[in-house]
Amino acid sequence: MEIFIYVFAALFSVINPIGAVPIFVGLTQNDSKQERSRISIWTAINVFIILIISFFVGQYVLNFFGISIDALRIAGGLIILNSGFALLSGRFSKTRGVNKKVENDAQQRNDIALTPLAIPMLAGPGSISLLIALYQDYKTINDQILVCLAIAAVAISIFAMMRSAHYLSRILGASGIVAISRIIGFIVIAIGVQYISSSVVNILKTLQ
């Protein structure tokens, strides 16, 4: 259960579906309620598939390119740090690759569930690198099942957030969403610092 809670909290913080609510509202403001539900569920499914593939296949990609796990953790930690600082400073959408040009292009698409919602807004480099690193820590079948359940729980949370995005946007308002995002941003920064510091310690140990 501790593994489930840790992975869920870390993934949820890095992905931050609450911060994505205003973007979802903007992209679906002219859609019907039924269409928003369809987009919400397919966004969650796409994120789940991407994260599961990242968790199980990412390590083999690293091996193919000869990248060490500590190098990945440092790179991923820097990306996570950048996301955390972006949440604190209110530059969330810019770090997710969702600028005005992308938003205008997305509104002309028939289906936005994969891009830009699932990629790069939710399942971005931060969450992908986090899962690749976690695969090294949880190699037993039971641990991996718990990680998969945590990923599924995050996907369900994303569906719930996107499905009620227009309602949440009215209830919380822009200031409420910003406040929550900044709190999450602080947690994300701590996760990034932990990944970088632990990797640096491991590298220094190998040099001794």
Image (spheres, grey):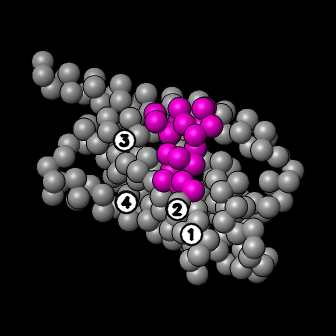
Residue at horizontal 87%, vertical 50%? 171
Query: Above or below — where is 126 with respect to 155?
Result: above
- Crowding near the residue tagged with mark 4, few <14, some 14–19, many ≥20 C-alpha atoms within 10 Å: many
Are the residues tagged 1 and 4 within 8 Å (C-beta)?
no
Q: Is residue 40 magenta?
A: no
- Crowding near the residue tagged with mark 1, few <14, some 14–19, many ≥20 C-alpha atoms within 10 Å: some
Q: Spatial distance from mark 1 to mark 3, Cα to Cα?
A: 27 Å
- Crowding near the residue tagged with mark 3, few <14, some 14–19, many ≥20 C-alpha atoms within 10 Å: many
Are the residues tagged 4 and 3 within 8 Å (C-beta)?
no
Tell me where residue 172 appears, x and y as whole percent: 83, 46
In the picture, measured across the screen, residue 190 lies left or right of residue 68, that is right
Which numbered disc flags the more N-terminal residue, 4 or 3?
4
Dot 2 amino acid type? Val
Dot 4 amino acid type? Ser
Dot 3 amino acid type? Gly
Tell me where residue 50 appears, x and y as whole percent: 44, 65
Magenta: main secondary structure: helix
Q: Which residue is mark 3?
A: 76
Viewer-nearest of discs 4 and 2: 2
Q: Secondary structure at mark 1?
A: helix
Q: Hey, which residue is sitting farthest right in the picture?
A: 171
Q: Secondary structure at mark 3?
A: helix
Q: Which residue is mark 4?
A: 54
What stretch of residues is rendered in magenta? 81-100
In the picture, measured across the screen, residue 198 lies left or right of residue 49, that is left
Q: Secondary structure at mark 2?
A: helix
Number of marks present in the image shown: 4
Locate the C terminus by quadrant.
top left
Residue 159 visible in this rendered orientation of the protein: no
Q: Spatial distance from mark 1 to mark 4, Cα to Cα?
A: 25 Å
Which numbered disc flags the more N-terminal residue, 1 or 4?
4
